[in-house]
Image: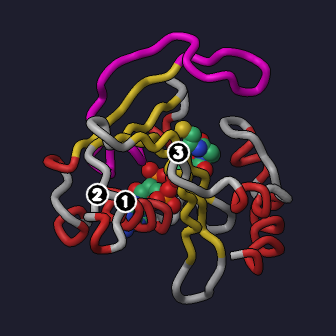
Amino acid sequence: MTADAGPYAVAVRRSAEHVGRWNPVEPDGLPELLERQGPGLRTFLIVDLATGDLVGKCNVANIVMGRFCNAALGYDSYLPYAGTGRMTEGMRLVVDRCFGPLTDGGLGLHRLEINVQPSNERSIALARRLGFRHEGFTPRMLFLDGAWRDHERFALTAEEWPGITSAR
Ligand SMILES: CC(C)(COP(=O)(O)OP(=O)(O)OC[C@H]1O[C@@H](n2cnc3c(N)ncnc32)[C@H](O)[C@@H]1OP(=O)(O)O)[C@@H](O)C(=O)NCCC(=O)NCCS
């Protein structure tokens, strides 16, 4: 994945305005992100199969196993693919991998959450397209762009995931 650092930087730079309203923009951040991969963090790059171009990124973060088996999904899509449905398609694969058994290359998770700022309509639409349930509202949940931001909380458990074929 180190070879992806160049194309990643180009895609993130190109998408700075699209991403920057909601998430930090770190075009040169892939090497450091790769170094941080471990039991608590897994990153998936979403690629368009026809072109090999980078469509988006999903961090499966705050992974806690034991009796919780829970993680939080954080994601960005990149121009020119944002808004074409490819990100949704890639996220379905990520969710499927998250719920897959450890013995089969999955992450063995039971619950996934997506936390979204209330006015981020495109992210809320993506969470709903993936079948996530609205669980509630948390004031001052995450520190983003210099302030503690309110978030709507969405979640999905493995029992609710119909599997990759039915989720399409
Ligand atoms: C949130 C974000 C990742 C959503 O991604 P996206 O680019 O909208 O996702 P997609 O590429 O799946 O595109 C979805 C659109 O394609 C359409 N679409 C077309 N074919 C589709 C298909 N086969 N499956 C699903 N959607 C399809 C959808 O209807 C939707 O259209 P709409 O935007 O008119 O409603 C993106 O807006 C983003 O990166 N935002 C900035 C960063 C951010 O907010 N991150 C999340 C913080 S919580």
Q: Which residues are magenta?
A: 125-150
Q: Which residue is mark 3?
A: 61
Q: Quadrant of residue 74?
A: top right
The percent coordinates of residue 62 (x first, y second) are 50, 39
**Left or right of 29 in this view: 101:** left
Q: Is mark 1 within 8 Å of ligand 1?
A: no
Q: Are marks 2 and 1 in contact (CB under 8 Å)?
A: yes
Q: Is residue 7 magenta?
A: no
**Which label sits in the foreground, 2 or 1?**
1
Q: State which tag comes first along the sequence, 2 or 1.
A: 2
Q: Residue under label 2, please give it.
A: 99
Disc 2 residue: CB within 8 Å of ligand 1: no
Q: Amino acid under label 3?
A: Ala
18 over 77 or under it: above or below: above
The residue beneath circle 1 is 107
Q: Is 155 in front, or is 108?
A: 108
Is 62 on the left-hand or right-hand side of 106? right
Distance between mark 2 and mark 1 Cα atoms:
6 Å
Residue 33: x and y, percent? 71, 56
Is 164 positioned to the left or the right of 49 in the image?
left
Q: Residue 147 in the image: x percent, y percent?
A: 73, 16
Disc 3 crowd, CA 10 A, few/some/many (<14, 14-19, 20+)? many
Q: Quadrant of the C terminus?
A: bottom left
Taking the spot 49% from the left edge, 35% from the top edge, the residue there is: 121
